Image: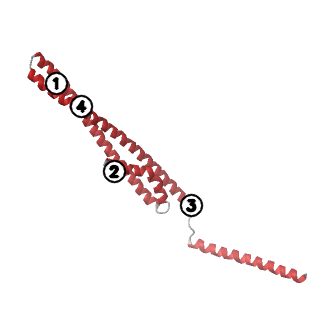
Amino acid sequence: MADSLRARVGRIVSGGAHALIDALEEVMPDALGQQALREVDQAVDEVRAEIGRAIAARHLAAKRLTEQSSRHDDLSAQIELALSQDREDLIRAALEHQLDIEAQVPVLETAVADAAERQAELEGYLAALQATRREMAEDLTDLSAARAKAPKPPTDGELAQGAKLSELERLARRHLVEERLAALRAARQEG
């Protein structure tokens, strides 16, 4: 799960925002933009769940480490008592148990450190995803605003009126050309 989550977060953060907005400019920006934001939100939720698991693992390992350290200290006190009563059999049993605990302590310390490292890594993912989401939301808002400001395509009535005006301009221009041609002919006949 960790590698797939890492890859997904990387994909979303590295190119998701700009590639998505570029693709959306040509099609339904609102619907696809909202879908992309939902994908980021889903990734954020997954990362938060992983953070929760890392915190729980860290807590459990730290609790077990504390318990083992406490047990080690209790055994030291019991060894002192057994020494005072010259009970070598009890001393040996307590020392063996202490050795077992001492073997577990480095593993538990590593588990605590690994869980803390994983938590920090996931918090970095979370921050990156949240920043990407904010950027995507801003880009979508800007795109929507730009589309709202863009001139609307003309209606059929506006197109018909424009065609009529264009035809009127052609007629007026043709009339000017005919007037100048008539003036040139008249000047030539007089001269």
Q: Nearer the viewer, residue 177 or 166?
A: 177
- Against 22, is 97 above or below? above
For residue 150, the mark is 3
Q: Position of residue 89 (x, y in %)?
A: 8, 23
Counting residues from the start of the chain, the first of labels 2 and 4 encountered is 2
Answer few, some or many: residues within 10 Å of disc 1's Cα (few below 14, many 20 plus, some between 14 and 19): some
- Look at the numbered disc 2 and give the secondary structure of its residue: helix
Q: Residue extending furthest top?
A: 84
Which residue matches tag 2? 4
CA distance for labels 2 and 4:
31 Å
CA distance for labels 1 and 2:
45 Å
Counting residues from the start of the chain, the first of labels 2 and 3 encountered is 2
- The amino acid marked with disc number 2 is Ser
Counting residues from the start of the chain, the first of labels 3 and 4 encountered is 4
Badge 4 vs badge 1, beta-carbon distance below 8 Å: no
Please tell me which residue is depicted at 42% across the width and 56% down the height of the picture.
Answer: 34
CA distance for labels 3 and 4:
67 Å
Indicate left or right for 18 with 124 as reference: right
CA distance for labels 4 and 1:
15 Å
Task: Name the front one of labels 2 and 3.
Answer: 2
Indicate left or right for 95 with 114 as reference: left
Which residue matches tag 1? 75
CA distance for labels 2 and 3:
41 Å
Residue 91: name its quadrant: top left
- Against 122, is 36 above or below? below
